[in-house]
Every structure is written in structure tokens, then in C-alpha cells.
Amino acid sequence: MRLDEQALHQVHRPADGEGESFVEFASWRTIADYYFGRVPIAHAMFRVAELEPLAGLRMRRPVLEIGCGRGEFAEAAILSTIDYGIDISGKDIAIAEQSGKFGRVCCADARSLPFADNSFATAISISVLEHIEHPGEVIAEAYRVLAPGGSFVATIVLSDIHDCSAVSRLLKRLGMNRTEKVYRSILNLIFCHRTLLNRDHWAAILQTTGFTVIEMQRIVPPTVIANWERRLITAWPYRISHRVAKVLASRNGESKVRCFETIRQMIQQWRDDGERQGACLFIRAQKPAV
């Protein structure tokens, strides 16, 4: 439903004596079971690796999800409901509303949020900012609508994704630099990557906006990206029809347990090796308390 002007300013806050209310993330295994049973293996491997640092986190209400899409993330990872979801796609918002995972939803541009200042305790943005031009405006809006002491939680695809690519590295070793650039452009086009920045650039945007960075770590190892690339051809039905993709994923011959263990081993080995590269970034930042 599109929120009316009055509703936009009626963000729920716990009443006196009610205590603080939280939104909790599911366990990592629960998140993995969701994705491996509903989407192509390539997409599932990427998302499971990306969401690993969020498993088990608690977010203080009220919570705003910026770029909620069809509500896939909320269905996979949130144990209860998210208070508000916004997305620029009216079609996706209609599907998210039917998911039952949001208190309210509205169609809005993340660079101009239809909420009053200091409305939320938490704002989350999962794999969204890389798809938006001028994402600094989104971060500034998140800062504005957060109450003092509020938290911003995000995952973002980095420009490093191409450095993590096995195909890109191979093409460079063969001296096929022009072909490698074309490959990058094709991937960016397919996945609608409009703004790919490095870790330092994102840190600078957050700090310039006024956020205090609590945690910032690279996530999604190059080994996951290599496996993702090998399986991309099997993901084409997902681009055509989400319904077809879910049917195919539910019949996938690869064991959920084996896939999950593979991802876990990749991440553990990567951490043991020093986490020198990662395709995405996990961020927790805070708006200073007054």
C-alpha cells in the first residue's frame, strides 16, 4: 500500500514499560536453506556468502529496509517482520506487500525518502547501493531518517568483484585486456551495477555523511565468485521467471547440506588466509547520539 502523509509520520515506537523491541535475523543455516531451495545455485551461493555476517544479528525497531524489492531478503533472513519497506519498483512492492514480512510498504526513491527526520532506529540496505546512481544521496537520507544513536546496516557489491573474478584474471593472464573489459561490462549490464566503488570510497561517504563506522569488512571470497561464475549459465531461468527458477531450484540435484558446507569451508579458508580480497562489503554504522 502507498503510505499517506499522516502514516509516514506515525512510526511505531515501544510504549513506556514495553521495553525495546527488536527484529532478529535467522541463523545462517536457515538462510542457506531458504536460498538453496528457491533460487539457482549460482545466486544462492552468492547470497548465502553475502548474508553470513548478518546471521543472528538483532536490529532495534522501528526498522526500515531500503530497496526491499519483492521481499526475498526479509523472507529468507528475518524471523518476524520489518516495520517499513521501500522500493522504487511498484511491481516489486506489490509482491513484497503480499509476503507478509512488512508492517507497511511504499513505492519511493531511496534518494528522497518519504519519512520525517529521526523516524527509525535501524535502516538496512542489502545489496542495493551498487544498483543506484549517486548512492551517497541514499546514505544521506538514511542518516536523516535515523534517530540519534540509530544504526545503518548494509551489504554492498564492491568494484573488487572483478578482481575476484576467475574469468577476468584468466583473460588478463592471456593478455586479452580488451576482452576482459567487455566481460566486466557485460556482467555490470546483466546485474544492473551502476556504481561500483572500493572499500575506502564507501568509508569516505559514510564518514562525510556523519556516520560513525562500527564495523566494515570485506565479504564473499574469490573462491565463491569463481563457483558463482561457473554456475551462471544455470541461472538464466531466474532472469526470465522467478516462478520457473523456484521450480528448478527445488529439484536441484546438489544437496543443500553439501552446498552449505562448501560455502562455509570457503569462507573459513579465506579468513585463515587473511581476507585479502572480497567481492562485497558488510557495514554497520551509527548515527551519533545527541
Image (cartoon, helix red, strand yellow):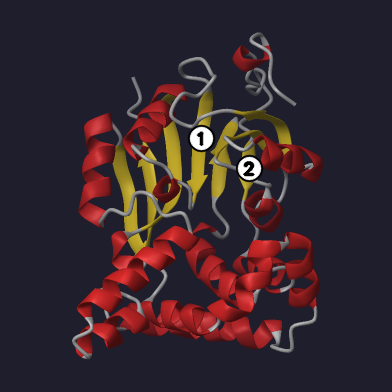
Q: Which mark is residue 234?
A: none
Q: Amino acid at mark 1?
A: Thr
Identify the residue shown where x is 68% and y is 19%: 3
Could you tell whether 82 is left or right of 55 in the image? right
Residue 79 visible? The answer is: yes
Q: Quadrant of the C terminus?
A: top left
Residue 119: where, in percent of width, then height? Answer: 52, 20
Identify the residue shown where x is 75% and y is 26%: 1
Could you tell whether 193 is left or right of 249 in the image? left
Residue 8: where, in percent of width, then height? Answer: 62, 16
Q: Earlier in the sequence, mark 1 or mark 2?
A: 2
Q: Is residue 40 above or below residue 136?
A: below
Task: Identify the element where label 2 is drawn.
Answer: strand
Residue 168: where, in percent of width, then height? Answer: 31, 79
Residue 59: where, in percent of width, then height? Answer: 55, 42
**Residue named by callout 1:** 122
Label 2: how many residues lie within 10 Å, few (<14), some (14-19) or many (20+)?
some
**Residue named by callout 2:** 23
Task: Identify the element where label 1 is drawn.
Answer: strand
Label 1: how many residues lie within 10 Å, few (<14), some (14-19) or many (20+)?
many
Quarter of the image holding residue 148? top left
Task: Determine the CA span between mark 1 and mark 2.
Answer: 10 Å
Q: Amino acid at mark 2?
A: Val
Furthest toward the top, the residue is: 6
Give 222 or 275, whichever is nearer the viewer: 222
Could you tell whether 50 is left or right of 90 in the image? left
Give 117 or 136, whichever is nearer the viewer: 136
Q: Is residue 113 above or below residue 195?
A: above
Verify CB contact (< 8 Å) between mark 1 and mark 2. yes
Identify the residue shown where x is 57% and y is 80%: 233
Quarter of the image holding residue 7? top right
